[in-house]
Amino acid sequence: MGQLTDAVLSNATAAEIAAAPLPEEYFAAHLRVEDATMFEGVVDKDVRKSLRLGHVPMPELAPDEVLVAVMASAVNYNTVWSAMFEPMSSFRYLKGLARQGGWAKRHDQPFHVVGSDCAGVIVRTGSGVRRWEIGQHVVVSPAYVDDQEPTTHADGMLGGDQKAWGFETNFGALAEFTVVRATQLIPKPTHLTWEEAASVPLCAGTAYRMLVSERGANMKQGDVVLVWGAAGGLGGYAVQYVRNGGGIPVAVVGSERKAEAMRRLGCEVILNRTEIGITDEIADDPKQVIRAGVRLGEMINEQVGRAPDIVFEHIGRPTFGISVFVAQRGGTVVTCGSSAGYQHSFDNRYLWMRLKRIIGSHIANLQEYWDAHRLFELGHIVPTMSAVYPLTDVAAACRLVQANQQIGKIAVRCLAPRAGLGVTNPELRERIGEDRLNPWRGLTTGSDGAEFGGQRDDPA
């Protein structure tokens, strides 16, 4: 490792970190532009074949940016999309960003460093950065916004130049270093380890905006909230927000192992997706969609006494028509993605005649991220991390997410030499409790069926 990395790992002072020379290149998980067509005509777009590991050049820092030494990152589905080159090659996003000119040109490279979650240490600041200093421990919001765009000051997510960092921009977080704008920074929760903190930003912020924010469903105490994919990264945070806010989460999962994950979060109403009769095929058959919606509505009504006030959607094509049907009269369907298909079909009569709403939601603005992280500092919401992989095994971790075999979030150690580091407030951690902080640790298993106990480390 280089002098800068050694300084960070030895908890050197800010002056010592600043004095350590920047490396000319760094180790990163990345895609190569020459691979962008490798999956054409291929059914199984195995991301282990497209994600590469190796060194890439260190980019120059813009005045409004910081360079972060990445202690840990995490896998999100947008990295799976990038590695499958779907719905289009991410290199098209990078070329579009580069057309802005100036510093944006740096993003158009023959490689794309991916990753949209980060916990780490600031090692350099641009000349225009005022509120952040070298040596600070931070997590990173994936909302990459233009602070000179007027709309950004009303809501950063409405800005025309808003992008998902590490997905629509280069120099992402599955690497030893990452480049981010100062407007993406949030103080790292002091009681969390590097890998726990890295499993929080993207999914926790997205779920917060969808459910709690006035720009989302604006959930009230007592609301019944149907959460699809409840044992995933997004769903695990959604269930916690609903419980913390006085609502009633109804979790939909696909296996008993995932039902157990829900029970560990204190969720009492758990439905198995197979019992509802949902398959990819029924999305094109309106009658089957209605039948599945009726079955689901009866199951929910039997357990909680009424239809959902809010449906938390991110599955997409197989579930969206059912979501519109099953929501309460006057209820809300809030969606942030379509991991199983983004061409949706639904019976519009159940939307307009029953006065329901569909709300599109994307990531979260900086204030929403800060509000969400306050709940972590209070111990009201906890990470949904279930396993830790080293950066050298990131392709295998992404494959688990691609195959929907994971529970919650899979964290990735980047510069952190082992799991369990980064806690600067052990008293708060002890007060919250290890079991409370890690309800899902060890629940993700590998393809060989061996349970990693929450950590898969290098033999050394």
Image (cartoon, rainbow, N blue to C red):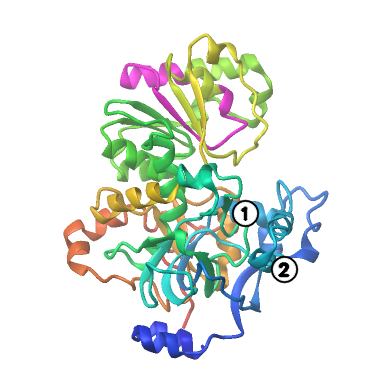
- In percent of the image, x 34 and y 64: which residue is there? 188
Residue ID at (65%, 77%): 56
Stretch in magenta: 296-321
Kindly indicate the quadrant of the structure image that contains residue 95: bottom right
Q: Nearer the viewer, mark 2 or mark 1?
A: 2
Magenta span contains residue 308: yes
Residue 368 seen in the figure: yes
Q: Secondary structure at mark 1?
A: helix
Provide the residue designation for mark 1: 80
| Residue 152 percent location from the top left of the image | 50, 47
- Kindly identify the amino acid type of the residue bearing the numbered disc 1: Val
Question: How far separated are the C-alphas under marks 2 and 1?
Answer: 20 Å
In the image, 448 versus 99, the foreground residue is 99
Side of 273 relative to 310 (left or right): right
State the residue in front, 245 or 124. 124
Label 2 packing within 10 angstroms: few (<14), some (14-19), many (20+): some
Please state the horizontal and vertical placement of residue 122, each as a whole percent of the image. 42, 74
Q: Is residue 99 magenta?
A: no
Is residue 205 depicted above or below 394 in this figure?
above
Locate residue 313, reporting x and y percent. Answer: 50, 33
**In the foreground, 16 or 270:** 16
Q: Are marks 2 and 1 in contact (CB under 8 Å)?
A: no
**Mark before the other along the chain sequence, 2 or 1:** 1
Identify residue for label 2: 109
Q: Residue at x 30, y 33 (%)?
A: 268
- Name the kind of residue labelled 2 in the image: Gln
Is the residue 239 above or below the residue 26 in the image? above
* Image quadrant in which you'd find residue 197: bottom left
Few, some or many residues within 10 Å of mark 1 (<14, 14–19, 20+): many
